[in-house]
Image (tube, rainbow, N blue to C red):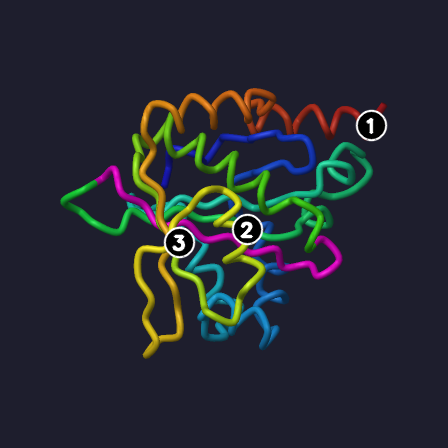
Amino acid sequence: MRINENTLLEGEKVVLVPYNADHVPRYHEWMKSPELQQLTASEPLTLQQEYDMQRSWREDSDKCTFIILDKQQWADPKVQEEQCMVGDVNIFLTDPSDPSLAEMEIMIAEPSYRGKGLGKEVMGMMMCYGLTKLGIEKFEAKIGLDNQVSIAMFKKLNFQELSLCKVFKEVTLGMTVDDSIQKRLLSDMAYMKERDYKKTCSNRQEGLSQ
């Protein structure tokens, strides 16, 4: 989506930034991992195909993605943004007849960052963004049955099991956001800040030159 091409979301542990061409080489290296291919139900792509995919994420009106950065590293202007990357998070608008329904995906690609609560914060940030900027009211997540960590995380976020597909070995979890859930979510994530991505990058560069 073009809507988030200049949006930076800052949380306590992470920073979410739009997926740019500069991020592709490291993302491509991640996706050579058989483990990540299995967890994300993805096929390996060539580097050029990965650049094409990045452009698709930027242009397509039914997809929204952010790269997840380690905030502590990112706060140091001497560290390049690509070195701060730890994963990505996505929203798909899956039903053209219902723009309030979206599927969510998250990948913590760097093993050393798993189990530290980043995923829960990222999902809270992304749900707030979906609610306030995209008009999403119903969230779903399709997760492989082997991925018990992700299943547990979504259930902690109060997602409920909607269906179980033994053929594809995946479970669909979902949440419909009513007024009370929205109030609680926005309150829990009140610390999240939305910034101008290009201006923030420029300020980081100025910090490096000082």
Q: Quadrant of residue 178?
A: top left
Q: Secondary structure at mark 2?
A: helix
**Mark 2 or 1: the one toward you:** 2
**Mark 3 or 2: the one toward you:** 2
**Any magenta on residue 111?**
yes
Query: Residue 185, position in %: x, y?
Result: 47, 28
Instruction: Using the image, determine if residue 210 lies above or below residue 65.
Output: above
Tag 3: amino acid:
Ala
Distance from disc 3 to disc 2, alpha carbons, whole Å, reads 11 Å
Q: Secondary structure at mark 3?
A: strand
Distance from disc 2 to disc 1, alpha carbons, whole Å, reads 41 Å
Tag 1: amino acid:
Ser
Q: Which residues are magenta?
A: 99-113
Query: Residue 76, position in %: x, y?
Result: 80, 34
Image quadrant in which the N terminus is located = top left
Identify the residue at horizontal 35%, vertical 44% (top origin). 139
Please tell me which residue lies in front, 41 or 147. 147
Pointer 3 local density, CA inside 10 Å: few below 14, some 14–19, many at least 20: many
Tag 2: amino acid:
Met
Which sits earlier in the primary sequence, circle 1 or circle 3? 3
Q: On residue 209, which mark appears?
A: 1
Query: Residue 151, position in %: x, y?
Result: 50, 58
Identify the residue at horizontal 65%, vertical 43% (top origin). 69
